[in-house]
Image (tube, rainbow, N blue to C red):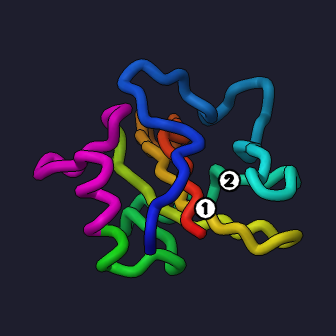
Amino acid sequence: MKLLEEIKKPSYQSEPDFITGRMDGNKTYDFDCSRCGVVLKIDFQSQIKYSWNGKSDKISDVEMTHLKRHYGIGLSEKAHDGGFPVFDKVTCKECGQQYITYSGVREFSNSAYIISVLGIQNIN
């Protein structure tokens, strides 16, 4: 896995993209494929599900180690927003372009979450 183009960079002051119970009801984070322009989606419920392992099944343990090093996630195992880091892969169904996504997932109350999409990288 070679990280090529950083589409979204982490920030310590980023606004949350999802908050449980928020009225706008966004269920996904949408971004455009850099190759063909198709709208791609990061599903927030999947990010919550992956927060227990820190990654989806599309990310290997070796890739996760590399991504943690790349994003500066240390011994505290905290994402830039203070939540748990979650890594996933999104593939454009139109052109096959792949992206690594990095989200921070915080459980602020029992089964209530705040999610921030912190990084998106083009990988091929």
The answer for how far apart the CA atoms under marks 1 and 2 are is: 11 Å
Main SS, magenta region, reads loop
Establish if 104 lies above or below 63. Answer: above
Quadrant of residue 64 in the image?
bottom left
Establish if 1 lies above or below 25. Answer: below
In this view, the residue in front, 119 or 47, is 119
Quadrant of residue 19 in the image?
top right
Q: Residue furthest left?
A: 75
In the rendered structure, does residue 72 fall within the stretch colored magenta? yes
User: Measured from the top left, where is residue 106 in percent x and y?
Assistant: 41, 40
**Disc 1 designates what residue?**
99
Q: Secondary structure at mark 2?
A: strand
Q: From the image, which quarter does the N terminus lie in?
A: bottom left
Quadrant of residue 123 in the image?
bottom right
**Disc 2 designates what residue?**
42
Residue at screen point 33% across, 42% down:
79
Residue at screen point 36% across, 24% down:
12
Start and end of the magenta stretch? 65-82
User: Measured from the top left, where is residue 14 in percent x and y?
Assistant: 48, 23
Mark 1 residue type: Tyr
